Image (spheres, rainbow, N blue to C red):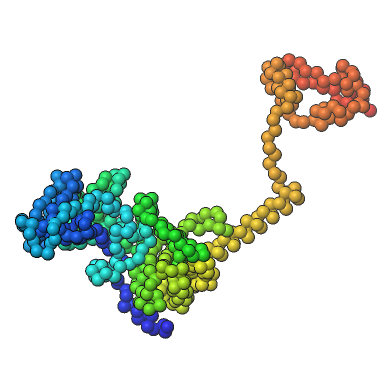
Amino acid sequence: MPEAPDVLLLFCLVGAADALYKRWIPDTNYENETNWDKGAVPCGNDVVRFSAQTQVSVFVESAHAVRETRLPVDGEFILNSGGGFYASAGREPGCGPGVATRFKDPGSLRWFDPALWQAAASLDDLRRGRFLFSVHEESVPCRWDDVVFRALSSFRVDTGSGGSSVPVRAVSVRGKVFDGRAEFAQYLSSRSGRLQFHGSSAVTVGNPGCGDPSGCECGNSANRRRICSSVTCASVECKKPLLPVGHCCEVCGAIVTIRYAAGFDLQTYRQRIHHLFLVLPKYKSVQLGMSKVSRSRRLMGIVPFGASPEVQLTLLDGEKGAESEALAWDVVSDARSHGSVLGIAGAEFRASSGGGGGSSDQSGASAGTVVGVVLAVFVAIAIVIVVALIRRGVVRMPSMPSAPSLSSFTRKKDGEELGGPLDRGYDNPMFDNLNMLPDVPGLHGNEANSISITQTGGVYFANPVYDENETDFNA
C-alpha cells in the first residue's frame, strides 16, 4: 500500500476518543420475554407472580392487561410514559387459556461476569452495535471506562463481596450520567439505587479517564479470580493453544505483540487495523482484541528483571487459527512498512499452529534479546577471569571457619587458670612445633633451658642460638 494514503488515514483518525464504553446487557424490563420462566410476556389471561422475597426494580414500557398479579415484598415498578396495568376478566382474545408465569430472580447476575457486558469505542458505536472484542479481564469495566445502563430499562446487578470499591470513570442510569462521587453515592442510597445495585462492594465514579495516548492498563488483574470464576472454557483442538494476558482460557488463534515508541496512539491504531484488514471478506470471522499490558522480562528466559509495557493484539477466528495467523502476518508486515509513521518500534506474533515470528523491529534487533545476550556474555567472561585469578593465587577463596580443636580448648583453659588469656605476640616456628627441632641439645631434657610459665612473669624460654653462659662479647 502506498505511503501517502496511510499517512492520510492516520491524520483522519487522530483525535478519536481513548475511553471505552461498557454496557450492561441484562435488564429487568417487563417486556423482555427472557425475564419470564415461560419465555413469553404475560397476557391478560395469565397470572403474574413475583417471588415474595425477590428484590427487583421492574421497568414497564407500555400498558398491560393482567388477570392477577402477586407482587414482591420489596420491589418497584418504573412506569414509562404510557406504561401501566389494567384489570382483565381473563377473556383476552388470542391469549390462550391462561397460565401462571413467574418473573425470574435477577439477583444472581454479577458485575464481574464478562459475558454480561458489551464494549464499544464510542456511544455511537454502542448504539449501532459495533462492539469490540476484549480479553476476559477487559470485558468487565476497567477503571477508565464509562458504564452504560440502557435509558429505557431497569436492572439488578451484584457488585460482589469483600467491601472493596469498584472504580469507573462514569455511570449512566436511565439516561442520566453520574461522574461525581457525592451525587452517585446519593443515588445508590435511594430506593431505586438499592434495588438496582446490591453487594458489599460499591461502584464508585469520578476516576479520571486514560490520559496516555498509548493506552492504559485495565487494572482488573486484581479481580481475575472473580472474573474467571464466571467463565467456562471450551476445549481447544489447535496444536499449541495460546493464553493471552488477561484472558481466562486458552485459545486457538494468534497473539501479536507491539513494542511502541513516541507518537503511538492506541485508538488510532485500533481503527487503522479495522479499516485496513477487518473489513476484508477474508477476515470477517476474526475477532480482534487490543489492550495495553505489562509483560515481565526474563534474562535467558529464566531470571525476571522487570516488566515492560506492550500492546497485545489477540486474534481469534473460531477455527484452528488459520485466518488469525494470516491476519497476524499482515499486521506485522504493516508494522515493518509503516512503523516509523505509526510510532511502532517492533512487532512479532505467536500462532496456535506452532508458527510465528514475523518479527519487525525498527532498531534492527529486539532490545530484550540484545540485553539478554550482552548480560550472558558478561557473566561468562567474569566467571573465566575469577577462575584464572584463583589459579594464579592472586585471589584466594575465603576459608570456612573450623570447629575449635581440643588443644585450643586446653590452651584456653590453661590461660584461664593463669588469670586471663596469654598473648604470645606471634607464632614462633621453632617453638610452636617442637618436632621441628628434635636434635637441639637441652631443648627438652635440660630443665634450665626449657620453657617455663609463671603466674606473674609470663612466658620464659631458652634460646638455643644464644646462650649467655657461653657467648663471649669480648671475642
Picture residue at 13% right of the left edge, 57% below the top = 98
Q: Could you say where residue 231 lies in the image, as x and y percent from the top left?
A: 37, 55
Horizontal side of 302 relative to 83 (left or right) equals right
Picture residue at 35% right of the left edge, 50% below the top = 226
Picture residue at 18% right of the left edge, 58% below the top = 29
Query: For this rendering, which residue is in front, 364 or 66?
Result: 66
Residue 449: which quarter of the image?
Answer: top right
Furthest residue in direction right, as rendered? 475
Q: Is residue 57 visible?
A: no
Q: Could you say where residue 455 lies in the image, as x and y percent from the top left?
A: 73, 15
Query: For this rendering, which residue is in front, 63 or 283?
Result: 63
Image quarter of the C terminus: top right
Picture residue at 53% right of the left edge, 72% below the top = 364
Query: For this rendering, which residue is in front, 95 or 85?
Result: 95
Horizontal side of 162 relative to 358 (left or right) equals left
Image height of 262 relative to 96, above or below:
below
Q: Could you say where residue 423 lies in the image, as x and y percent from the top left?
A: 71, 25
Residue 117: which quarter of the image?
Answer: bottom left
Image quarter of the N terminus: bottom left
Horizontal side of 255 relative to 42 (left or right) equals right
Query: For this rendering, which residue is in front, 244 or 30?
Result: 30
Q: Could you say where residue 273 lies in the image, as x and y percent from the top left?
A: 38, 74
